[in-house]
Image: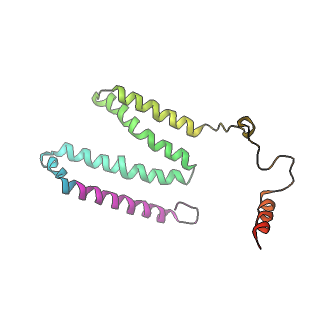
Amino acid sequence: MFGRGRSWRDRVGFLAAGMGFGSASNALFAWQSGGFAATHSFGMVQWLAVILLGVFGGAAAFYLWVYALERTTPTRVANTMTVNPITASIIAALVIGEAISLSLVVGMVAVFTGIWIALTDRRMPLESLGLEPALSEASDETSSQVSRKASRATTP
């Protein structure tokens, strides 16, 4: 999907189509369940907030996500997306005095722990688990030689 063979425009178009389908699905569910009733009382400030959240919290964030996928690993990009709700909660606490609850703190610790685990490359050697590697360092056989031997052994 995001391979080097596709152009930037193709990837952004694919992303826009996905977001459009998701938005249309959400709108359909909200309409069927009566979720749009609350918007009848919206004033200019509330509609401005909806637009800003849609543009910056949705479209711009995902555009930057595709941009970042071109320049770094998918793991790092995915980790930045998990930090967005935490950042929004902290900004809400600082700007509008939103309360920071215990569940938010526990969630923040869990997300940061997950990010730390994902970004830390602590591979346990097989020998410490009592396992032997498939090919030892002393072996002259490459994996392609091993697979060729295996295919010859299974071919009649």
Residue 28 drawn at (x, y percent): 24, 59
Question: What residue appears at the point 79 percent right and 65 percent down from the top-left corner?
Answer: 148
Quadrant location of the C terminus? bottom right
Residue stretch in magenta: 1-29
Residue 141 drawn at (x, y percent): 84, 56
The colour scheme used to paint the residues is: rainbow
Q: Where is 83 relative to 156, above or below?
A: above
Q: Is residue 112 magenta?
A: no
Left or right of 105 on screen, residue 146:
right
Question: What residue appears at the point 17 percent right and 45 percent down from the top-left corner?
Answer: 44
Left or right of 63 on screen, residue 55:
left
Question: What residue appears at the point 53 percent right and 52 percent down from the top-left corner?
Answer: 69
**How many labels were placed on the picture?**
0
Residue 144: quarter of image: bottom right
Q: Where is 55 relative to 123, above or below?
A: below
Q: Is residue 14 magenta?
A: yes
Q: Main secondary structure of the magenta part?
A: helix
Residue 42 drawn at (x, y percent): 15, 45
Question: What residue appears at the point 47 percent right and 66 percent down from the top-left corner?
Answer: 10
Residue 129: quarter of image: top right
Name the foreground residue: 40 vs 118.
118
Q: Where is 67 relative to 115, above or below?
A: below
